[in-house]
Amino acid sequence: MGPEATIIGAFAREAGLPKDFDTLADRLHRPLAARIAGWALEDRSPLIVGICGPQGSGKSTLVALVARLLAARDLRVAALSIDDLYLTRAERVRLAREVHPLLTTRGVPGTHDPALGLSLLDALGRPGAIALPRFDKAADDRAPEAAWPRVEGPVDVVLLEGWCVGARPQPAEMLAAPVNALERDEDPDGVWRGFANAALAGPYAPLFARLDRLVLLTAPDFATVRAWRGQQEARLRERLAAEGRDPALAMDDAALDRFVTHYERLTRWIAEDLPGSADVTITLDERRWPREAP
């Protein structure tokens, strides 16, 4: 058994992944790690790689294992999620009051802190310890800074993952028609979706401009995204119970149905818009397996 196979096996056991995960890793994680390692040799340091994919597509698992595989190649890696750049709940409540009530719900552009992301990317290119923010989804708020992990800079590779990483604003005319009942009933004037679109054109653009490479994961359809997200919430419920926390902090089916509709517009737009500009596009099937190796 080679060193990469050993790393993959240990990772799968720690994460409680299925027995066939090593086969998936051979098709997806190992080739992608090799591709990123090649980029790191060619490009400036740190190399900033965006990994974009819909909710539940396996981005966190992908990044965690790829980071280990890159570390085995003597590359210093920092892994970030755009979820960890969410505004605090108090800040989102203020936005909901001042702009639109739907902004209470985390997710769409406008509910993150892109300036925090930019400052982190700058810091990761310099010597010294850097604290990486974390967001507690069960509490729906930023985790206390004492709980943030630290990495030592400068790093060689930054992996920035998220459902809207690299997204570009839609043409204005596409905002007029609602894509679902949430937009039709709760955003009839388009204020909320217009705010999110303007955020992509504004403060998110400098953050995404820092990406040296972009890897895009795509789902078969939005119904699959909903199913994947439901599986995530079920795992969260199990984790909360194991930690002695209230499993009811996870969303039930009705709450989850409403939650994912906040993401539908941009999820569909990203799948239409980004394949032409991403450096690597990986088409996933319903099992989250790639139809072709990256």
Image (spheres, helix red, strand yellow):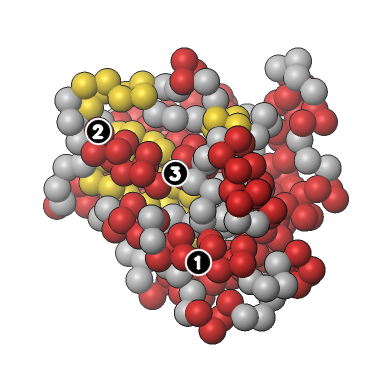
Res. 290 in view: no
- Alpha carbon separation for disc pair 3 and 1: 15 Å
Point 35% across, 71% down: residue: 277
Pick the quarter of the image with the C terminus.
bottom left
Q: Amino acid at mark 2?
A: Ala
Pick the quarter of the image with the N terminus.
top left
Q: Quadrant of residue 3?
A: top left
Residue 152: image x %, image y %? Answer: 26, 23
Camera-side mark, 2 or 3: 3
Q: Amino acid at mark 3?
A: Asp
Q: Helix or strand or loop: what does disc 2 sit on? A: helix
The tag on residue 113 is 3
Q: Is residue 116 left or right of residue 282?
A: left
Q: Amino acid at mark 1?
A: Asn
Residue 81: image x %, image y %? Answer: 46, 41
Residue 6: image x %, image y %? Answer: 42, 28
Which residue is at the front of the view, 243 or 204?
204
Point 47% across, 40% down: residue: 85
Disc 1 crowd, CA 10 A, few/some/many (<14, 14-19, 20+): many
Q: Is residue 24 left or right of residue 155?
A: right
Q: Which residue is mark 1?
A: 197
Residue found at the very far front of the displayed protein: 98
Disc 2 crowd, CA 10 A, few/some/many (<14, 14-19, 20+): some
Camera-side mark, 1 or 2: 1
Q: Which residue is mark 2?
A: 123
- Alpha carbon separation for disc pair 1 and 2: 28 Å
